[in-house]
Image (cartoon, rainbow, N blue to C red):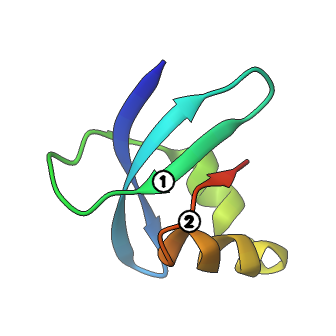
Amino acid sequence: MQAAGYVVLDGEKILVLVRQKKFCRALKRRYSGADGGHFTDEELYLNMKENEHIKQKLLAGEVINI
């Protein structure tokens, strides 16, 4: 299953494509399209101080698994 949505990181809305895997979710940044659903759990995880390096990977366009 995959879904389009967004997360708010540091006050900026980031569009993402989310794919459900067996034990995690894979997030990839997208740059266009409708907003879609708001992924609040993933947003809370990425806004935690100790996950700053994971957030930077997402903002750089890499696929992250959380």
Task: Name the residue at the right extreme.
Answer: 50
Tell me: residue 9, above or below residue 17. Answer: below
Tell me: residue 35, above or below residue 43. Answer: above
* Number of other residues with Cα within 10 Å of mark 1, as a class: few under 14, some 14 to 19, many 20 or more: many
Q: Which residue is mark 2?
A: 62
Residue 10 placement (x, y as % from top left): 48, 81
Q: At x 62% / y 74%, what residue is drawn? A: 57
Q: Which residue is mark 1?
A: 28
Residue 62 or 50: which is nearer the viewer? 62
Task: Name the residue at the left extreme.
Answer: 33
Q: Which mark is residue 61?
A: none
The CA distance from mark 2 to mark 1 is 6 Å
The amino acid type found where label 1 is placed reads Lys
Is 64 displayed left or right of 37 in the figure? Answer: right
Q: At x 74% / y 79%, what residue is drawn? A: 53
Dot placed on the residue nearer the N-terminal end, 2 or 1: 1
Label 2: element kind: loop
- Label 2 close to label 1 by CB (< 8 Å): yes
Q: At x 74% / y 34%, what residue is drawn? A: 24
Is 29 displayed left or right of 52 in the figure? Answer: left
Tell me: residue 12, above or below residue 22. Answer: below
* Number of other residues with Cα within 10 Å of mark 2, as a class: few under 14, some 14 to 19, many 20 or more: some
Residue 65 placement (x, y as % from top left): 71, 48
Label 1: element kind: strand
Task: Name the residue at the front extreme.
Answer: 62
The amino acid type found where label 2 is placed reads Glu
Q: How many marks?
A: 2
Residue 29 placement (x, y as % from top left): 41, 60
Q: Where, by quadrant of the figure, is residue 30 drawn?
A: bottom left
Residue 32 placement (x, y as % from top left): 17, 57
